[in-house]
Image: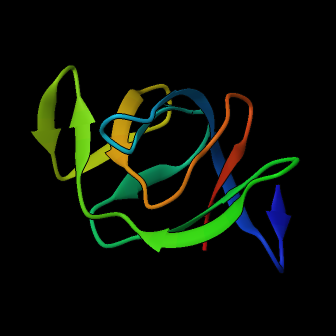
Amino acid sequence: MENETLGQEIGVIVDYYSKVNAAGIELKSGDIKIGDKIRVKGHTTDFEQVVESIQLDNRPVEEANRGDSIGIKIKDKARKGDKVYKI
């Protein structure tokens, strides 16, 4: 699932919370940690950002792994089904 321009696909957006600018992400492969750079891409979504916080089971964590359902703050709107890449 490597793509030179997108990076490694690690998950998919399952929820977007506009009031707090956060997204629920289901990690399908790989891992994610604070400080990683990610790209969120979908039909009308395309932005990059550095991961500044991760929530797992409503608690802050430093990293998460494949199979986890996490929440992160995001800088732009995301939509259910958008792909998440680690770059």
| x and y, in percent, of residue 68 in the image | 41, 27
Task: Using residue 51 as the reference point, say whether residue 45 is left or right of it.
Answer: right
Is residue 67 placed above or below 6 in the rendered structure? above
Most extreme residue toward the left is: 59
Colouring method of the image: rainbow
Looking at this view, name the residue that lies furthest to the front.
19
The reply, left or right, for residue 30 in relation to residue 20 is: right
Q: For the N terminus, give its image quadrant.
A: bottom right
Residue found at x 60% / y 74%: 87
On the picture, is 51 further left or further right than 83?
left
The structure residue drawn at horizontal position 57% and vertical position 48%, both measured from the top left corner, is: 77
Q: Position of residue 17 (x, y in %)?
A: 42, 30
Residue 34 in picture, x, y percent from top left: 27, 63
- Residue at the image position 24 percent from the left and 29 percent from the top: 56
83 is higher (above) or lower (below) than 53: above
Taking the image as drawn, is residue 37 in sight? no
Q: Is residue 27 left or right of residue 52?
A: right
**Image point (83%, 79%), residue name:** 4
State the residue lying farthest toward the bottom.
Answer: 4
In-front residue for pair 9/79 = 79
Please determine whether, in this image, residue 56 is positioned above or below residue 43: above
Q: Position of residue 86 (x, y in %)?
A: 58, 64
Q: Is residue 87 visible?
A: yes
Q: Is residue 54 above or below residue 75?
A: above
Q: How many marks?
A: 0
